[in-house]
Amino acid sequence: MTIKIKSIIVAILLILTAAFVSVAFPLATYTLTLATFGLAHVLTELSYVDSRFNKRLNIDLRKKIIILLLAIVNIRILQVFGALTSWISIPLELICVIGLVTVVIPTLKAKDWKLEILAILLCFILWAGIFWIPILMMLAFAVLHNITPVGFIAEKLRGRGRKLALNACFIVFALIPAIILSGYPYNFLSDLNLVAPSTSILQAGNLQLHLGAFIPQQLHRSAVAQNAFSAAVFLQCMHYAIVLGVFPKWDKTRPKLFHGVVIFLSTLIFIYFTQSFSDARKLYSIVAAIHAWVEIPILLLAAIPTVDKITITENDK
């Protein structure tokens, strides 16, 4: 059996296992994977983005992105310490995200007008979300963020390998979540007495307390809430799997010390999660915001045709 076939079998087993535990034990899966892999995946993803895209940005564009990200971090910190309510902090954060999209529009305009239109449309959607239901917009991005590895895969690979990878991504990031959302897997496992939705290894409360990570408050009592949460948890697991399992193989620039630091910091925050899941989740959200929002302008730039052959310069303005 070749290494490639073994890797495919391992990947299939991982996907099926993640789907099973996400449906049967959604709370345990969400809390344990977040506590174990959350920070590690954030640091690894930021490392990959920096290695792959940093040199393609001119100094002015980098400064603008960093300033906006620092603004988001400060907003998150103020929210964590109670200086800002979510009704104020969420619209402010989304306004910063609009800024992140806006700063890359001149480059997109110079390279591909279709991407410019896409970025402008995204800005309009964000503004509509701010004035309509900002919390729902934030939750939508929380779910959609788990699909970002697909964009990085499409940017990295070429030819037949890219086509095969994107077909696999369609199954993993679209088809399987849709099946989970339908409720059939839960009903099947429930008939076999293999489900325990509120079971958690960590002391994190019951499932109702965590539905808000992905599901709007208005739907928490609905029949679809648990299935939607399970589908989002599965997406999160697959996001972690690609970032931690694939990106390090593509990023050969980081020294071994980096991996040691990631393991050390991940261990510390895992211990914090075991002591107070709620407080650790708030702390994690500050760091997570950086990697979640920086990927929006980066992926827009990555979508530029023949992006590997160009350098984004000041002349693109």
Image (tube, helix red, strand yellow):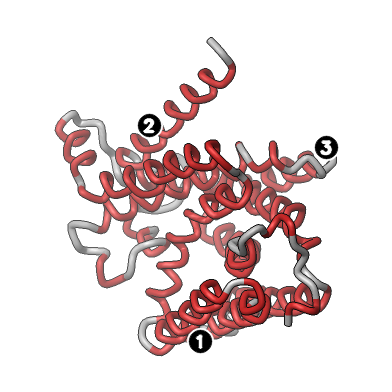
293 in relation to 236, above or below = below
Which of the 4 image quarters holds residue 16? top left
Q: Is residue 283 visible?
A: no
Which of pointers 2 and 1 indicates the residue nearer the eye?
2
Q: Residue at x 56, y 13 (%)?
A: 2
Kind of element beneath mark 2: helix
Q: Which residue is nearer to you in this view: 183 or 48?
A: 48
Label 3 sits on what residue type?
Answer: Lys
Q: Which residue in the structure is indicated by mark 1? A: 88
Kind of element beneath mark 1: helix
Q: Residue at x 33, y 54 (%)?
A: 229
210 in relation to 313, above or below = above
Question: CA–CA distance between discs 2 and 1?
Answer: 40 Å
Q: Callout 2 environment at 10 Å: few (<14), some (14 to 19), or many (20+)?
A: some
Q: Is residue 42 left or right of residue 147?
A: right
Residue 194 on image: x %, y %: 25, 31
Kind of element beneath mark 3: helix
User: Which residue is farthest top?
Assistant: 1
Q: Is residue 302 visible?
A: yes
Q: Which residue in the structure is indicated by mark 2? A: 16
Q: Residue at x 26, y 50 (%)?
A: 181
Q: Which residue in the structure is indicated by mark 3? A: 256
User: Which residue is farthest bottom?
Assistant: 131
Question: CA–CA distance between discs 3 and 1?
Answer: 41 Å
Q: Callout 1 environment at 10 Å: few (<14), some (14 to 19), or many (20+)?
A: few
**Quarter holding the C terminus?**
bottom right
Decide which of tag 3 and tag 1 comes sooner along the chain: 1
